[in-house]
Amino acid sequence: MNGDGIGASPERVGGLARVTGRQVYVADVHLDDVLHARLVGVPCARARIVSVDASAALAVPGVRLVLTAADLPQPIPRFGPQFQDRPVLAVGEAKYHGEPVAAIAAETPDAAEAAAALVRIEYEELPAVVSISAALDPAAPLVQDPSLRDGDPLAATNVLRLHRYGWGDVDAATADVVVEGTYTFPMVTQFAIEPHGFMAAPDGDGIAIWSAIQHPSWLQRVIAGLLDLPLAKVRVFSPDPGGGFGGKQHAKYEPLVAFMALRAGRPVRLVLSLEETFQAVRRGASEIRVRSGFRHDGTLAFRDIEANYLIGAYADIADRTVAKGSYTANGPYVVPAARTVARSVLSHTTPSTAFRGFGNPQQIWAVESNMDEAAHALGIDPTELRLRNLAHRGDAFIPGDTPADGEWRTVVERAAEMIGWGSPLPPGRGRGLAVGLKSGPTTGLSYSTVRLLADGSVVVNAGTSDMGQGARTIFAQIAAQELGAPIEWVSVVMGDTAVVPYDQQTSASRSSVLMGNSILNACREIQAKLRAMAARAEGIDPSEIVVDRGEVRIGARVLPIRDVLIRGLGRLGGELIGIGEMRKEAEPEHPLGGTAAFFEFNCTAVEVDVDRETGDVVIARHVTVSDVGRALNPMQVRGQDEGAAVMGLGHTLMEQYIYDDAGRIRNLGAIDYRIPTSMDLPLLMESDIVENEDGPGPYGSKGMSEGALLCVAPAVAAAVREATGVVIRDLPLTPERVWRAIQDTAARPEAAARPDAEPGPRAAPG
Amino acid sequence: MTTSWPIALTVNGRSRTLEVLAHHTLLEVLRADLALTGTKECCLVGECGACTVLVDGESVDSCLMLAVEADGAAVTTVEGLADGDRLRPLQRSFLASGAAQCGFCIPGQLVSAEALLALTPHPTKAEVEEGLAGNLCRCAGYEQIIEAVLAAAAAELPT
């Protein structure tokens, strides 16, 4: 056992490269003879493509290729993780602002840029739908070609899928008080500081792809399918992403650069501008109506939710975010009857995709805001109302799913204590508290190999993507702990499908649990081999030998693993290899295809200061407490929790896409779309964790990294209400919105007491 | 547009003479012509700070400076902070504080912090927040970045 094992906070593995500029991100990869690509689109949301004339572009010196849909195999190859609806290039109709209609490859970026301006696209602008109400209008144009949805009864609508979840009989439920409201959440973008980069190159009789993707193995499958190649002929390099946040899940332009590279016979490189990333990835917007019924004592009687999520022009993984966020929409509460109806609504906008929280922040904004309004309507303290309804460990709070897997009330109590819940506040200040719950992965498969080399150093091969969460460090800590190597003696190899075994993906805060267990299993296999090795050397039975945490114990003797290894390997040297596997099997009968591997649970409490003259909200204190099971690396846990908290403040206070009538994003880029800077931080940030070693991951850990983002918005809105008396149900809480709400309330005092509470008893309408 | 200009500058202590296109930024020249890829490219409009370098000791968004404007200047990039394997105090404190998560913004954060500490060797927390306001971090590891800068300043370690 050494000081860098589990529960310690050694320096980040890969940290040295990150502070010296030596870390190689995808855009830093140099390929000889590379061609530089540029995308060409049309300046509106939706257009019929009449013709593409590339002659002037091809005449630009250095231009080698102008690819259009006509140059691709027919019918055009399509891809997508859930529905294969996305064409490699727009075909017939462009469906969102920024969708590529053609792509240039040239010897220099300058030539590619010059040529992009010379591609003449003749197009007819068509009416576009960019809002939920417009998309659901029966007269709305269809976003998706119904022929792609053969046999789907919703094919003639813009509803991609309709989900129904719940239990009990909501229609028969009665309540003393019913509180209802509609809550909206805007389109926001992942805004990784590293814009997406994609490269492809012919590689012998196959192809090599470079992408900062969160799942190299899955991308390998997608490319192999599109190019009709065996998996073994597709090599995916996935350098550590410079931030992913879900936006680097699922293929975007990798298929395009693959076709370009094969056509050109040379490597092709496409690095998106930040503006283009806005047109490539975003979070789904939502409009969610919540009706909650309560007994006078605050006990939940029923919950009825209708959610519409505005997804983009192609499905990507958006519908899955709708499903997963909506399935747990009731949150961590025990309620006898619950019903959620959720639609993923297609529109002529940037395809929405995974984004930290994965469909949950939208539901949590709605339901937790509704809980706060209910507390006011019931005259019960908002924290007390939550504690009164919170599931206890072991409660089947979602019938048929994993029971509550933590003592969540201790998390709430800790946060309330830290923020000083209930203590007096100066005028203009307010406090708010909310909770967030998210289901972890529902299926998963993570292989790893661990090699104990002849000198006792260790190589771990894992297909996880380290995008800042610190997976390399966690894996190195596990291997160091189990195999007795100093952490500096552990190398963690990732990001090359020719070297690293299959991993499903880096998502849903899974890697410490699933890949962590896989690596732990591989280490245990090596420990078994060490036992056999020592037994041979000692001439005793392996059962008399214990290998634990880096030591070999034979009776009273304790030997370092390294000594047994060197002796056992003998003159030829060699190494011991362990293969790890961790599965979370699918459960086909489950509404999500599988129960939760674990739940992430967080409680956020804030204290805000609102300037009534300007509407400016200052977060005076921000308390975030997460149930992490066991902190494998407390410094990294803190970084993830506080980072998630501040990212949550982004969609709470400032971030949103603004569309014009033509369906173009008006605030593309860093000047007009603001994310939190060092000047936007809470005046005091306090994070804490609850550790009961009750998770399914190594040493009792649970997944974390998303939890602290989930309920930031409702906590802040509740605090703003307490500070101002104003209820706001739309995000973000910009100064303008807060100021207008204050003015409106001043003009109409009755609006301040507007929790839409109705006296009961009352049956819910059908 | 394609006119080349000869420039001479010092990059991380090394004299370089090269021909650059008149419209190419210092960022493009550092990354593409000099293969110094530690300086990062993100917003290209001077808002994110990922491309921050020191030009004659002042922090500059290298995406907003033409390479020809750097003719005759001394440029320091993140690669030039450490002396071989001897890290700068800021680099060491960034590691110790866990300030680097995905790491993509860190070259810019470090260079901005160097510029800040050169002017204000013992900044307050508010001064650090203001000094780094032009450097976005989407991991939002700001708390640990700020702590790292304050720790480096407090340690007064020999450079």
Image (cartoon, coloured by chain):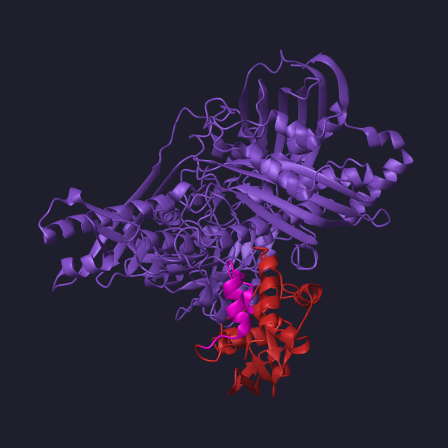
Chain colours: A purple, B red
Pick the residue in front: A287 or A402: A402
Look at the image and tell me whether residue A447 can be seen: no
Picture quadrant where residue A765 is located: top right
Please state the horizontal and vertical placement of residue A5, each as a whole percent of the image.
39, 54
The single residue placed furthest to the left in the displayed view is A539
The single residue placed furthest to the right in the displayed view is A747
Query: Is residue A72 depicted above or below A697 in this figure?
Result: below
- Taking the magenta stretch, the answer to whether it contains residue A315 is no
Image: magenta residue range = B86-107
The single residue placed furthest to the front in the displayed view is A556
Residue at 33%, 48% in the rendered image: A519
Pick the residue in front: B63 or B98: B98
Pick the residue in front: A52 or A334: A334
Pick the residue in front: A692 or A681: A692
Quarter of the figure that contains the C terminus of chain A? top right
Look at the image and tell me whether residue A153 can be seen: yes
Residue at 62%, 80% in the rendered image: B55
Picture quadrant where residue A572 is located: bottom left
- Taking the magenta stretch, the answer to whether it contains residue B93 is yes
Quarter of the figure that contains the N terminus of chain A? bottom left
Please state the horizontal and vertical placement of residue A405, each as a whole percent of the image.
47, 32
The number of numbered discs placed on residues in the rendered structure image is: 0
Please state the horizontal and vertical placement of residue A486, each as a whole percent of the image.
34, 61
Please state the horizontal and vertical placement of residue A391, each as a whole percent of the image.
55, 27
Query: Is residue B137 depicted above or below A648 in this figure?
Result: below
